[in-house]
Image (tube, grey):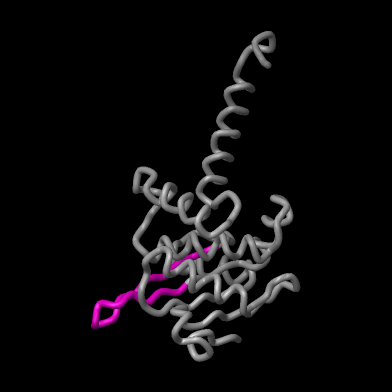
């Protein structure tokens, strides 16, 4: 465990980065520095704990708190202190990050950064399921600012468009398919 706030209090706001499951190609300190930079870019103040663990743990958290019995890549949990400061926790599956990074051709650490940014946006109050694209636009803007490849929401929307196009093509008579 690397406790960034104790080492560089003037640089890092991220409280703790916990790697319960550490992939070989992940630099823990660099990831913590990125998390602090992303947190400032999002405009989120307060302590954030980032817990990087297994898909089995994410599945259990997803089942317990969202009533969905499946693994997921990132979960965010927001709380507010008596002083009104946001304190949040992110739980991220290192296994899903590694698999997704491999498919997309980038490092596990890059995928973890994308998931950290996505989770921080949720902690800041964004909700891509109901906000009419505001989170998607903000994630895209921050992704460019933080030198990240295609963001999580953009990938999800691209997959949906592809599935819809495939369903439409499958429904066309044979002579009309392209």
Q: Position of residue 153 (x, y in %)?
A: 50, 49
Q: Which residue sits at x=55%, y=79%?
A: 17
| Residue lying furthest left | 83
Check residue 78 for magenta coloring. yes
Based on the picture, tell me whether residue 98 belongs to the magenta stretch: no
Q: Which residues are magenta?
A: 74-89
Q: How many marks?
A: 0
111 vs 163: above or below: below
The quadrant where residue 31 appears: bottom right
Task: Give coordinates of residue 133: x percent, y percent.
Answer: 39, 44
Q: Residue at x 50, y 91 (%)?
A: 6
Relative placement, left or right, of 8 versus 122 is right
Q: Nearer the viewer, residue 144 or 23?
A: 144
Q: Main secondary structure of the magenta part?
A: strand
> Which residue appears at 73% of the width and 55% of the height?
102
- In the image, 70 versus 137, the foreground residue is 137
> Which residue lies most toward the top here?
175
Quadrant assignment, res 51: bottom right
Residue 75, given in percent of the width and then of the height, sits at 49, 65
71 sits to left or right of 14: right
Kindly give the residue lying farthest to the bottom in the view shown: 6
Name the residue located 58 percent from the left edge and 49 percent from the top edge.
150
Q: Quadrant of the N terminus?
A: bottom right
Q: Is residue 6 above or below residue 13?
A: below
Q: In what quadrant of the picture does the C terminus appear?
A: top right
Residue sitting nearer the eye, 44 or 76: 44
């Amino acid at each position: 465990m690397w406790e960034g706030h104790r080492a560089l209090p003037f640089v890092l706001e991220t409280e703790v980065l916990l790697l319960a499951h550490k992939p070989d190609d992940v630099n823990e300190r660099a990831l913590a520095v990125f998390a602090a930079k992303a947190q400032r870019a999002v405009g989120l103040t307060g302590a954030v704990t980032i817990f990087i663990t297994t898909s089995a743990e994410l599945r259990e958290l997803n089942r317990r708190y969202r009533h969905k019995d499946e693994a997921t890549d990132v979960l965010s949990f927001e709380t507010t202190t008596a002083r009104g400061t946001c304190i949040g926790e992110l739980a991220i599956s290192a296994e899903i990050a590694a698999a997704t990074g491999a498919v997309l051709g980038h490092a596990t650490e890059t995928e973890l950064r994308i998931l950290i940014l996505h989770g921080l946006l949720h902690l800041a109050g964004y909700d891509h399921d109901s906000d009419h694209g505001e989170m998607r636009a903000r994630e895209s803007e921050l992704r460019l600012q933080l030198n990240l490849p295609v963001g999580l929401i953009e990938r999800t929307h691209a997959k949906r468009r592809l599935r819809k196009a495939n369903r439409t093509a499958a429904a066309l008579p044979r002579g009309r398919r392209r």
